[in-house]
Image (tube, coloured by chain):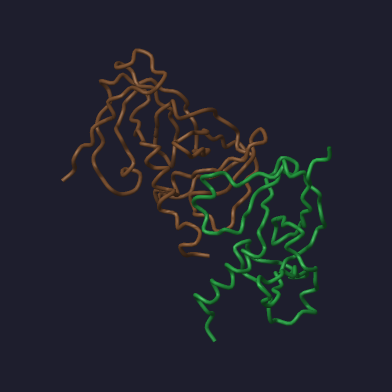
Amino acid sequence: MSQARPFPAAPPAGASNAGQDAWFFCLRILGGRYAFEASLVTEVVRLGPLTRLPAAPSFLPGVFTHRGEVLPVLDIGQMVGQGAIAIRASTRAAVVHCGPWKVAVISDGLEGLVVIPRRNLEASPAESTGMAEFLSGVARDKNGTIAVLDLPRLVEAARSRAVPFGSGGT
Amino acid sequence: MTEPVSELLMFQVGARVFASTVRDVVRIGNVAAAGSDGLIEGTSLGPTFARERGIVVAAPEGGVESTLVVDQVLGVRSVPESEIQPLPAFAAAVIRSGAVSGLVLFDEAPTLIVDLPTLVRERLAAALASPSPA
């Protein structure tokens, strides 16, 4: 039987009408609409040529440079076992800060900021597989349903699930 | 005052170009002329195509030298040390190799700097862990 997870009560930083509206950054991944707290996003960039890293997990397709800074790319689809996001010349990435980690999240398309009245937020079913494991809620706007991701938890899970250097692997 | 520079050996494995510090390299050799003993192939850098060149890497503590098989040796570039960057923290935390010591940007493209002794050590350890069938 599914149980509901409570949606985070605190409004995101920078939210207007705090307590009434929640601001999210919305993107499309493998046919679904997903969003995460907008305050995590520092900028949206066009993906440059990727440099693949040896012995990298599938969710880290490579690194690229943006204004002289080297950024790691995070493929959320691969992280949750739903398949790789196609990388094209037009692919853009959302650069996010999640605690100590700075990563560029790729997607099939970026919608950008969406403002959701908090009354339209619902708790997500507590499932433990795939993307559902990292959902913190479900929202609805005029374009349909948005699954809200707990991105810091997802990034931390990616880090902890990777076999670290010295613990095995090649 | 002159900025410190690093001498980087540029080499190619498959379609990809890598760099390593010159001080890790004993000499450049011809793979065909070398015996099969001590040849290092199938590393995490990826598969080779032409297998034309070998980078001889010193063994730590007086051990046997190893020859890393590569496709081409492209030359040596001097790079100001200020232009060498560490791996991004997230990447460093998740890759299963310690053989990438940093990055340098050439024409805006990140080129990996490979710690050759570590690369060889990891390959030898992997071979010991999963020996190929006789």
Quadrant assignment, res B106: top right
Image quadrant where one finds the N terminus of chain B: top right
In this rendering, position of residue B2 left or right of residue B115: right
Q: Position of residue A55 (x, y in %)?
A: 55, 58
Residue reaching furthest to the left: A1
In this rendering, position of residue A99 left or right of residue B111: left
Q: Is residue A14 above or below residue A8?
A: above
Q: Position of residue A17 (x, y in %)?
A: 34, 12
Q: Is residue B16 above or below residue A70?
A: below
Quadrant assignment, res A142: top left
In this rendering, position of residue A167 left or right of residue B56: left
Query: How many marks can you see?
Result: 0
Q: Position of residue A169 (x, y in %)?
A: 49, 64
In this view of the protein, which residue sits in the foreground, A52 or B60? B60
In this view of the protein, which residue sits in the foreground, B119 or B32? B119
Residue reaching furthest to the bottom: B134
Residue at position x 69%, y 61% in the image: B14
Residue at position x 25%, y 29% in the image: A122
Quadrant assignment, res B71: bottom right
Q: Chain A appears in which tint?
A: brown
Q: Is residue B69 above or below residue B13?
A: below
Residue at position x 64%, y 35% in the image: A66
Q: Position of residue A111 (x, y in %)?
A: 47, 27
In this rendering, position of residue A131 left or right of residue A25: left
In this view of the protein, which residue sits in the foreground, B2 or A22? B2
> Which chain does the green colour mark?
B
Q: Is residue A82 above or below residue B14?
A: above
Image quadrant where one finds the C terminus of chain B: bottom right
